Amino acid sequence: MEAISLLPLMTLLQLVFDTLLGFALLWLAWRALASPELFQAIVLFIAFGLLMALAWVRLDAPDVALAEAAIGAGLTGALLLATLARLEVKNRAKSELEKKHEVRVITEKSKHQTFFFLLRMLLFMVVATGLVYAVLTLPENTSGLAMPVLENLESSGVSNPVTAVLLNYRGYDTLLELSVLLLALLGVWSFGGIPKPYRSFPGPVLNMLSRLLIPLLIMVAGYLLWVGAHAPGGAFQGGSVLGAAGVLLLLVGWRLGTRFVGLPLRITLVFGVGIFVSAGVVFILLGRQFLEYPPSFAGVLILLIEAAATLSIGITLAALFLGGRPEFRRHK
Amino acid sequence: MNTVYLYTMVGVGLFTLGLYALLIHSHLLRKILAINVMGSGVFLVLVALAAPTQGAVPDPVPHAMVITGIVVAVSATALALALVLRVRTETGRAELPEEPLE
């Protein structure tokens, strides 16, 4: 009897929680985009990412929650803060003038201001109304692709449906996604070496903490990779945790030995894509489709591809954080 | 008003908010933040629509798409940030000029 009477209360509490979370997300996004201080804006953006992870959990998407917490909030935040630090180093001479300039966009008043404000508001009302209309008129109660995915789960080699979609059914997407990651690094590297004014002096806390955290992070990355076959986790979550370990190492001033920076680093970076493509090509030669795995050892293959991808993703993300091509022919 | 509609509306709100900020700010770092917020809005709509309606399992395909999207977003952000630093070294400022260039 008690359990039945508690049920509406739980639903109500969940609704209250969802509503609060929804408003918190909108408020944080607004504050992150409107705050005059860039540093504050980025910190609010990181908080926004963490609340997004909470929203994914509420929407029954734990895989996405893990990816968001590690990549969306963690690594994007680290990248933004690193860029801000590099901008500020160059900024120091210009000081206050520039900072005033940053907020001028919001505070400046002119004759046309009101007209353009109204025009903008009209534009955004139209966009928002159109989007709300489009979302509300979507057909309800469509089962989507959940049933086909679950029916073929046994032949996919893994029991976590999200991993099955990522590594088996939609392998092309994941292969191209790894290529995009590599392409982004290529773009960053094409701008030349690591930006000069970047010396960090870690305090004793960061120094000690990194020693404790990095082995733990590497272990968590391995665990996420392994557990991804049958529970939330996988190559991207594991890879981004590995990337976080790399970022921490770079923050305490560790750099890859110059003899590893040349070919060994590059091979590690393309390892994931390489294994993925060669697994696809081998099965073309055996008379199957590209990226079509035989059900009997799909599980092993997926684990192999994921292990290679985890390593490559981790190293690529850490390299992106470094923000430039490490030099490998430096003579003292 | 159930959970699905609540989160899709928040997603639409985030997208619109991001679009607004993208257009009004001239600082490039703020534009990158705005694009990321827009992306989060799109992801929220996708996953909210995939959520189970009556105790069934959620659709894993949009989940996988969103994970792909998050990784692509961080790649694009990293490249954009490198471009911002480059713009800064070339022009001395990390924002767009107020007046159109001649």
Image: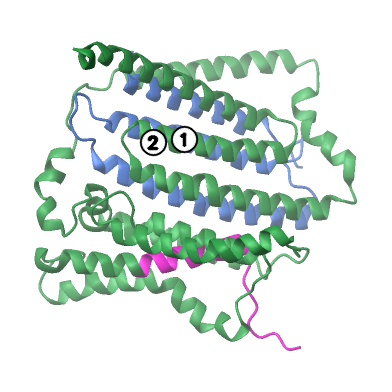
Residue type beneath disc 2: Trp
Q: Chain of mark 1?
A: A
Q: Who is closer to the viewer here, A315 or A245?
A: A245
Q: Can residue A13 be seen in this snapshot?
A: yes
Residue B55 placement: quadrant: top left
In the image, taking residue A33 as reference, residue A108 lies left or right, namely right
Note whether A297 is above or below A223 in the view shown: below
Please give the range of residues in magenta.
Answer: A308-332
Q: Is residue A330 magenta?
A: yes
Q: How is the image coloured?
A: by chain
Residue found at the very far front of the displayed protein: A2
> Is residue A182 among the parts visible in the rendering?
no
Helix, strand or loop at disc 1?
helix
Q: Residue furthest bottom?
A: A331
User: Is residue A146 on the magenta stretch?
Assistant: no
Residue labelled with disc 1? A52
Residues tagged 1 and 2 counted as in contact (Cβ below 8 A)? yes
Residue B1 falls left or right of residue A53? left
Task: Spot the blue chain and give its letter.
Answer: B
x and y, in percent, of residue A50 in the image? 51, 38
Q: Position of residue B9 (x, y in %)?
A: 41, 21
Q: Which residue corresponds to the image point at 74% horizontal and 52% vertical from the top-left?
A: A85
The image's mark for residue A56 is 2
